[in-house]
Image (spheres, coloured by chain):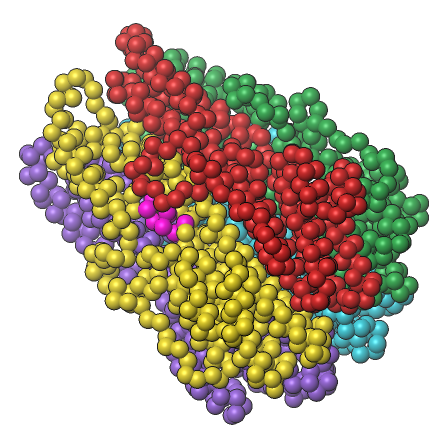
Chain colours: A cyan, B purple, C yellow, D red, E green
Amino acid sequence: MIIRPNQHWFLRLFDWHGSVLSKITFRLFLNILMSIVAIIIYQWYEQLGIHLTIAPFSLLGIAIAIFLGFRNSASYSRFVEARMLWGTLLIAERTLLRQLKNLLPEDKKNHEEIAKYLIAFSWSLKHQLRNTDPTADLYRILPREAFSEIIASPMPTNRVLLLLGDEIGKLRLAGKLSDVTYKMLDNKLDELAHVLGGCERIANTPVPFAYTLILQRTVYLFCSLLPFALVSDLHYMTPFVSVFISYTFLSWDSLAEELEDPFGTSANDLPLNAICNTIERNLMEMNNQKPLPALLKPDRYFNLI
Amino acid sequence: MIIRPNQHWFLRLFDWHGSVLSKITFRLFLNILMSIVAIIIYQWYEQLGIHLTIAPFSLLGIAIAIFLGFRNSASYSRFVEARMLWGTLLIAERTLLRQLKNLLPEDKKNHEEIAKYLIAFSWSLKHQLRNTDPTADLYRILPREAFSEIIASPMPTNRVLLLLGDEIGKLRLAGKLSDVTYKMLDNKLDELAHVLGGCERIANTPVPFAYTLILQRTVYLFCSLLPFALVSDLHYMTPFVSVFISYTFLSWDSLAEELEDPFGTSANDLPLNAICNTIERNLMEMNNQKPLPALLKPDRYFNLI
Amino acid sequence: MIIRPNQHWFLRLFDWHGSVLSKITFRLFLNILMSIVAIIIYQWYEQLGIHLTIAPFSLLGIAIAIFLGFRNSASYSRFVEARMLWGTLLIAERTLLRQLKNLLPEDKKNHEEIAKYLIAFSWSLKHQLRNTDPTADLYRILPREAFSEIIASPMPTNRVLLLLGDEIGKLRLAGKLSDVTYKMLDNKLDELAHVLGGCERIANTPVPFAYTLILQRTVYLFCSLLPFALVSDLHYMTPFVSVFISYTFLSWDSLAEELEDPFGTSANDLPLNAICNTIERNLMEMNNQKPLPALLKPDRYFNLI
Amino acid sequence: MIIRPNQHWFLRLFDWHGSVLSKITFRLFLNILMSIVAIIIYQWYEQLGIHLTIAPFSLLGIAIAIFLGFRNSASYSRFVEARMLWGTLLIAERTLLRQLKNLLPEDKKNHEEIAKYLIAFSWSLKHQLRNTDPTADLYRILPREAFSEIIASPMPTNRVLLLLGDEIGKLRLAGKLSDVTYKMLDNKLDELAHVLGGCERIANTPVPFAYTLILQRTVYLFCSLLPFALVSDLHYMTPFVSVFISYTFLSWDSLAEELEDPFGTSANDLPLNAICNTIERNLMEMNNQKPLPALLKPDRYFNLI
Amino acid sequence: MIIRPNQHWFLRLFDWHGSVLSKITFRLFLNILMSIVAIIIYQWYEQLGIHLTIAPFSLLGIAIAIFLGFRNSASYSRFVEARMLWGTLLIAERTLLRQLKNLLPEDKKNHEEIAKYLIAFSWSLKHQLRNTDPTADLYRILPREAFSEIIASPMPTNRVLLLLGDEIGKLRLAGKLSDVTYKMLDNKLDELAHVLGGCERIANTPVPFAYTLILQRTVYLFCSLLPFALVSDLHYMTPFVSVFISYTFLSWDSLAEELEDPFGTSANDLPLNAICNTIERNLMEMNNQKPLPALLKPDRYFNLI
C-alpha cells in the first residue's frame, strides 16, 4: 500500500515504484520490437494485397476494455472487502475491550489478559494469510501455556479464538458475567470469527482462473498485433502510439491481477503489518499500558507493508 | 476451481485445462471454415454490388460486448454469493462448536455429538446441490438412529438441521442451557438455515433463460457473419483476425454460462468437496480428535473438485 | 421461469418459447419492411444529395446499448431481489417451525396449527401479488374461524400475519414460552413482515416510467432509421443486417420490461406457484404429515409458473 | 410517480406527461435552430478549409454516454434507497403494532394510541421532506397535548419519535412490558429512527454538484456542436438526426437530475402522499377501525403524488 | 459540499466555483498551446509521410472513458459510504439519547451528561479526520475531568467512547439499568465504534495508488497527443475541439481524485462542520436545552464546509 505525501501532478507522471510499471517493462519492450518489425516488413506484405486495418482492432480493443473494466471491478471489490474485514477486526477488538472495561471496571488483570489474546489474534491472522511463521510474534505476546497449545495446532488462528472464548467463558462460570452480558462479549467473538472466515475465503478462492486466462491471452495477442494494424497509417509513429495503447491495457490487466490477492506484500496490497501495529497500539492505550509500540512508518518509496 | 501455482505469464497462454477453450473448440473451428468460405466467394459476391462492411459489425460487436459484460456480472455475482454462503457455513459451524465448548467446557461427549451433525450437514448439502447420493457420507458420520431418519426423508439436509436443533433443545430442557444461551446457539442454526435456503435458491433459479438465449444467438450469428465483413479489408488475414475476435466473444459467453451454476464439477466451479473436507478437519481439530482426515489436494491439472 | 433440461447449443438457437421473440415479431417484421423501402427509394434520395451514413448511428447505437445495459441492470436487480424475498420466506418459515419443534417437542397439535398459518401466508402473498382470488387456497388450508376473518379483510396477507402472531402470543401468555424464547419466534414473524413489505414495494413501484419511455422511443426510432443508414453500403444485404441489429436491441429492451415486474406469469417471471408448493411440502414433511402434495413440474415448454 | 395501465407500445411513443420531454423542449428547439444555421453557413466555412468531422464527436459522445450511465446509476440508486426507506417505514410500523397487539391483546386503547403516533410520524416525515406545513395533518391525527409539543419543536418528526418512545416506556414502567418485550418494540423505534435519518441524508446531501455541472456542460456543448459535425455528411437530414441524438442525451441527463431528489412532486418522484395513505389505512385496518380513509388514486395523467 | 439554490440551467454553465475547473485550468491552457503547436508544425511533418489519425485515439479514448467510469465509481462509493457513516452517527446518537430518556425519564442530569459526550464524540471525530486540533471544541463541551483525560490520549475519539461507556456502565452498576436495558444502550455505542472505525478506514486507505497513477498518465498523454491527431481533419478548429474533449476527461479524472478523500474541505467534500452542528442542535433540542447553537449556513459561493 503506497501512501504518497502530496506530490505535484507533474512529478507523479514519472513515478516508478507506485504503478505496476516495473512488472510490465519487458512486455512493453517486446511491443516496441514488434512495432519495428512491422515498420520493416510493411512494404513487403503490402505487395501481397494483405493489410491489417485498425477497424477490427477498434472493435476488439473496446470489447477488451469493457472486459478489463469488469475484471478490475471484481478484483477491486475483493480488495475493498479484505480491507473492510480488517477494519471490522479493529472495531470488534476495541469494542470487546471497551465492553469488558465498562462491565468489570475493577478487573484490570483481566483487561490485559484479554487484550493479549486479541492482539495475538490479529498477528496470527496476518501470518496465516501471508504464509509466514507466527512463532516469534505469538511468543512475544501470549502467556506461555496458551502459546504452546496454539503453536501446536494446525489452525493456530482459530485456536486463539477458542482459547479467548474459554477465558471469557470462565468469567461467566465465575459469576462475573450474567448470561446477557456474556452474550454481548460473545457477539464480538462471532465478528472475529467472521473476519477469520472471510479472509480465508478471499485467500483461498481467487477470481475464476478462466477470467485471468482469457483476458491475458486477448490482451497480449491484441498488443502484439496492434503495430501491424497501425503501421499503414502511422509509419514511423507506430512504436509510440502502440506502446502507449499497450501500456494502458497491460497495466490495467496487471493491476487487476495484483489486487486479486490483497494479502501479499507488493506495492498495491494491504499494509497488514501496519494494521496489526495499529490494533496493538489501540488496545494497549485503552488499558493505559506504556510505552506503546512505535508507529510503523512507510519506507522511502512511501510503501507501507 | 483451478488453483495454479505461480506460473510464468508466457506459459499460461498455452494452458488448455484452465479456460473454457475445450468447450468452444468446435465453434472456433466452424469460424475458420466460414472465413475460408468468405475468402473463396469474395470475388463472386463483389460483382453483385453487395458487400458487408465492418462499420455495422463494429456497432453490433460493441453492443454485444456491453451485454456480455452485464451477463458476466450476473453470473459472477451468483458465483460470489455461492462462495460466501459456503464461507458462512464454515464460520457458523466453527462458531457454534466454540460457543458450546465455552459454555459447557466439561461435556466433551456433547461436543463430539454436535460436531457430527455439523459435519453431516455440510456433506449432505454438497450431495443435494450436486444431485449425488449422500448415503455413504452420512453413514460414515452420523449415529445409526439419526442416519435412518435422515436418509428416509425427501429433504435430508433440512432434516439434519431439525435433528441438530433437537439435540441442542434437549440441552435446554435438561437445564444445561438457559434461554439466553440457548438463543445464542439457535442463532447459528438460523445461519445454517440461511445457507441451505440460499444455496437452494441459486441452484433452482438460473439467470432468466432469455438472457442466455438472446446473447448466444447474437454472439453466434455475429461470429458467423464476421468473416464476410472482414474479408474485403483483410483478405488472407481474415481467418486469423476472425478467430481471434470470435475467441474473445465465445469464451466470455461460455464462461458466463459455466459460472451461472457454481455447484457443478467443471474447472471453474466451486470445490465443494474441498470445502467439506476443510470443515470436517476444522471441527475435529477443535475437539482435539485424531487423526484428522487428509487434506484434499488439487489433481495434476491443478483442479480442485 | 423456464428451466431447460440440458439442450444442445445448436438446438437452442431455434427455441421459440424461451426468449421474448414472440413479443417482438411484429416489430422485426416492420423493420424488414423499412429495409425494403430503403432499398427501393435509395436511388431517388441519393440524387437530392442527401444520404444517411452509419457513423452517427454507430455513436447513437453504442449510447443506446449503454443505456440498455443500465436499464437491464435495474430490472434484473428487481428480479433478483424478488427471488431473494421468496427465498427468505421459505427459510424463515422452516426456521420458525424448527424452533417451535425444538422448544416444545411434545406439542404436535401446535406444530400443525402454526404450519397451517405459515402455508396460508405464502399462498395469500402469491395471490396478492398476482391479483388473483385467494379464497380457494385459504379455505383449503386454514381453520374455519381464521379463514372468515382473513377473507373479510381488505389486506388478507397482513391479517394472516396478525393472527399467526396471536397464536404464538397465546403460547407466551399460557407460559409455554418465556419472553426470550417468544422473542426468537417473533423475529421470524418480523422477517415474514419484511418479505410482505418488500414484495409490495416491488409490485407497486416500477422503475421510473421515463426510463421505459425514453429507451423505447430511442430504440424504436433507431431501428426504424437504421435501414436508411445501412443501405448505401450494404444494398441487398440491408434487411439481414438491419433485422439482426434490431433483434439485439429490441429483445434486450423487451426483456428488461418483462423482468421489471417479476411476479407475472410470463416465461421469464418467478414461478410463485412452484415456490408455494415447495414451502407447503417442506413444512408438512417437517411435521411428518403424509401424503405430501405432488411436486409441481414444468409444462411441455419447460415453463414453471 | 406515474403508474400506467397497460398501454399499447405504439401509443406510448407519443406520451407527453410521462417522460421529461416537457422540460427539454426548449433545448431541443435550440438544437433544430443550430442545425439550420449549420446548413446555411456550411458552404461558407468549407471554403476556409475548416470542417468538423463526426469522428471526434463519436469518441466524445461515447465518453459522455458512459458518464451519463454512471450519473444515472448514482441518481437511480438514491431513488431506490429512498423507496426502500419508505418501505421499511411501512413494515416497521405494521410490525410494531402487531407486536403490541400480540403482547397485550386486551389493551385496545393503547393500540389506537400508539397507532396515532405511528401515522403522525409518517405524515410528519413527508412534510419535512417536501418542506410543507405539517400542522393540519398532525392536528387531525394526534391527541391535543402531544400535538402542541410537537408543533412547537424545530424538529417535529424526531419529536414524534421521542414522545412515541415515552408512551411505550410508560408501558414498561407500568409493568405491562418486561425489559425483554420492551426491547422488541424499541427495536422498531430504532428502525423508524433509521428511516428518518436516512431520508434526511438523501434530502440534504445531493450527488456532488460537480458531476451535475460537468455533465450538463459537456452534454449541452456536445449537442450544440453536433449539427456542424453532421452537416457535411447529412445535408438536409442534419436537423432530424441531430435532434434525435440530442433527445437521447438531454433526456437522460434531465432524468438523472430529476431522480436525484426523489422526494419532490414531479412525475418521476416518489408518491409520498399515497404511501402515507397506505400506512394509515393499514394501521387502522389492523385495529379494526372504520371507516378507512379512501385509497388515493392517480390523476388523469396516471400521476400519483 | 455545494448546495445550490435553484439556478437556471443556462447560468449554471458559467459557474466557476462549483466544478473542478479551477484545478485544471493550467492543464487546459497547456492543451491549447499544444493545439497551436500542432497547427504550426502540421505541414512540416506531413512531408515526412507521418501522420497521426484519429482512429487509434478513438479506441484509446473510449478505453480511457471506461476506466474513468470505473475510477469514478470507486471514488464515489467512498464518498457515499463516508456520508452514510456520518448519517449513522446522527441516528445512533439521537437513538441512544431517546432510549435513555424513555428508560429513565426522571434523570434529567444524566440526559445532559450523556448528550455532552455524544456531541464531543462527533466534533472529536471531525477534528481527527481533518487533522485539526480538537482542544477548543472539547473544552467547550466536556466536563473538566473527562476533558483532561481525553486530550492527553493519543487516540482522543476512541477515548471519548470509552468514557461514555463508563458513564453508562455506572448506571448499570447503580442498578438503574438492568442487563437487558444496558445492552440496548451498548448496542448504540457499538454503532458509534463502527462509525469511528469506518471513517478511519476510509481516511487511511486510499484507492490503490496505481489506479490514480495509470489513469493520470494515460489521460494527460492522451490529451497532449490529441491535437496532433485532430489537426489533419480540423485545421483551425483543432484548439476548440481538443480543449472540449480534454475538459471532459481532465475534469472527470480530477473529480475522482477529489472525491476519493471525502473528509477534506474542498468544494465537493462532506460538510462535516455542518453535520456536527446538526447533531449538536438535535441532541440539545431533545433535552429542551436553550438556546440552540445557530444553524450553519453556506457561504456566498453556496459552499458548506
Tell me if residue D72 can be seen: no
Rendered view: B267 above or below D208:
below
Q: Nearer the viewer, residue B105 or D288?
A: D288
Task: Describe residue B57's horizontal placement relative to residue A278 as left or right.
Answer: left
Can residue C257 be seen?
A: yes
Q: Which residue is drawn at 75% across and 31% down?
A: E296
Q: Say which of B122 and C198 sits in front.
A: C198
User: Residue D126's image quarter?
Assistant: top right
For residue D43, what is the image quadrant? top left
Query: How many numbered marks have been drawn onto this rendered protein structure?
Result: 0
- Residue furthest to the right: E144
Left or right for B175, reference E177: left
Q: Magenta stretch?
A: C253-260
In the image, is residue A196 part of the stretch drawn in magenta? no
Left or right of residue C305: residue B24:
left
Please give the name of the residue rendered at 37% of the width and 42% of the height, measured from the top-left corner: C68
- Does the magenta stretch mainly form a helix, a strand or a loop? helix
Residue A247 in picture, x, y percent from top left: 43, 39
Residue under the image location 87 percent in, 47 percent down: E112
Q: Position of residue D120 (x, y in %)?
A: 68, 46
Q: Which of C219 and D139 is in front in this view?
A: D139
Tell me what residue is drawn at x 80 percent, y 73 percent. Answer: A178
Q: In which quarter of the image is residue A93?
A: bottom right
